Amino acid sequence: MFWLVIILLVFTFQAATILLLEFRNPAKAVAWLFILFCVPLIGFVVYYFVAQDYNKRKKVRKGGSRIFREIRETIWEQAHIVEHADQMSGSRYTHQHRLFNMLSHLSESPITGCNRSQVLTNGEETFEAMLRAMEQAKHHLHVEFYIFRDDVISTKFQDVMIRKAKEGVKVRLICDGLGSHKMSWSFIRKFQDAGVEFHYFLPPLIATIDRRVNYRNHRKIVVVDGRIGFVGGINIGDDYLGQYPEVGFWRDTHVQIEGDAVYFLQNTFLNDWKLASGEQITEPQLTELFPPHICSGNERIQILASGPDQDWDAIQEMCFGAISVACERIYITTPYFIPDPALYEAIKTAAVSGVDVKIIIPYQSDSRLVHLASMSYVEELLRAGVKFYQYRKGFVHAKVLIVDDLLATVGTANMDMRSFFCNFELTAVLFEMSSMERLTEDFERDLDQCSQIEVKVFQQRSRWQKGAEMLSRMLSPLL
């Protein structure tokens, strides 16, 4: 009896601790309590080392000491900032002052007005564009990826970076410590021996000890001489070229940007570089890192960064704000669909209101648990009028949102809670009609490779399937 009382007290203490620390996020508290009930004590140990807590968010933010504050004046003097809704292209924002004001105040990255962009579909087109731009580097080359593999295409990137470093170009490379953990030390040494500055972002062991293992850098950034930038869903690996038989064709989207918006890609990279390396950029470097450029385009583009180093969950709030004002269409492509409660209700409300909501998700996922959690959200949204499509040609990994003719986004963030609230993410918000039309064409072309989920058929899935989805749904805030 004595030991039973001790066990009960210990369990109660663990449960109370989780409830106290996660009172701001009930869904997350339920997920951790579910784990605690399944694996007592072990679940609490995992919670201690893995769970996001707000003190650590402050620590990451303080450690980052955003370099943006030091270079804000430089950027603002050189960039063409769109300050009023009537400065947007066409008349689409005439009655959208509220959305414009929200976007303008979401983060320290405003809407910029002097840009050119090119939507890149799939790995082959993206890698070709990246390598071509990297070959042009004269002063610096900044590369940051969640996954950087040790394979054929990775070696091509390595060769260019090594050659540029030997030519005197400043080459910096950041890879996420968990996402790129399979990169061999011999591969890394080739970078270092050639003068490429390489740093892992929060290596797993260090991050675990420091209780920051839950903060993964999911960004994919390339910046060439502060003039050309890339962002999107594509990492560096042969799988993004469809070379992995178990995955097959890999459908993805990236975007190449020239102009003012590159300043903010650069700023994000430098902030991550300081977090990863501890190096502080000095004032004399600003001119070459943020060079003046000739305005060769008039596209409006905004770069939104979110993560533990930010005061706002900017990408989630942008998605919620845009979906909430949609009148005609909402097109979403995402490999993982685990929306937070606010976004879930916004999508549901839009569909009930008659908005054409179409969502493309994979037919075969690379994570069984995440796939089950995603499917748990489908039935109620189907009944509300949302149309779900499963991509069957291969694996769809693109992260795209199109809302009316107001905006489209291409970035690194999935439509899930991990991307919105835990990971370091980056998204380009595009306001140019030509970009939206290209992304819409890609979306409609992808629909031809999809099968639509019919609500009556979906409701007939087995009890085992429904039960697995229910259990996965309980863990969805952590996935």
Image (cartoon, helix red, strand yellow):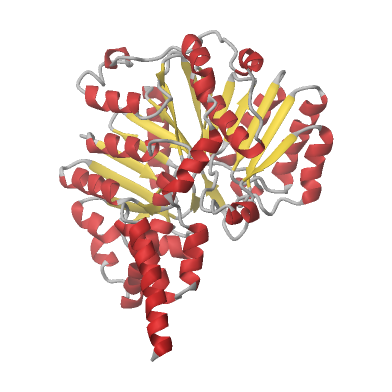
Left or right? Give the position of 380 relative to 3.
left
* Residue 449 in view (yes/no): no
Please report the residue visible at 40 percent of the width from the left and 45 percent of the height from the top. 420
**Image height check: is 252 above or below 1?**
above
| Residue reaching furthest to the left | 353
187 with respect to 338 (left or right):
right
Residue at 61% from the left image edge and 33% from the top image edge: 274
Res 331 visible? yes
Left or right of 393 in this view: 185: right
Residue 176 in percent (x, y) is at: 61, 46
Residue at figure coordinates x 66%, y 31% from the top left: 279
Left/right of residue 132 with respect to residue 447 in the rendered view: right
Residue in front for this viewpoint, 329 or 142: 142
> Considering only vertical position in the picture, is 404 above or below 413?
above
Of 123 and 479, nearer the camera is: 479
Q: Nearer the viewer, residue 378 or 475?
A: 475
Residue 229 image point, x, y percent: 57, 26
- Residue 325 in the image, given as x and y percentages of width and height: 22, 34
Question: Would you place residue 139 above or below residue 407 in this image?
Answer: above
Looking at the picture, how far across and down is residue 179, in whole percent? 60, 50
Rendered-image quadrant of the N terminus: bottom left
Quadrant in which residue 18 is drawn = bottom left
Residues 406 and 32: in front is 32
Please tell me in which quadrant of the rendered image residue 299 appears: top left
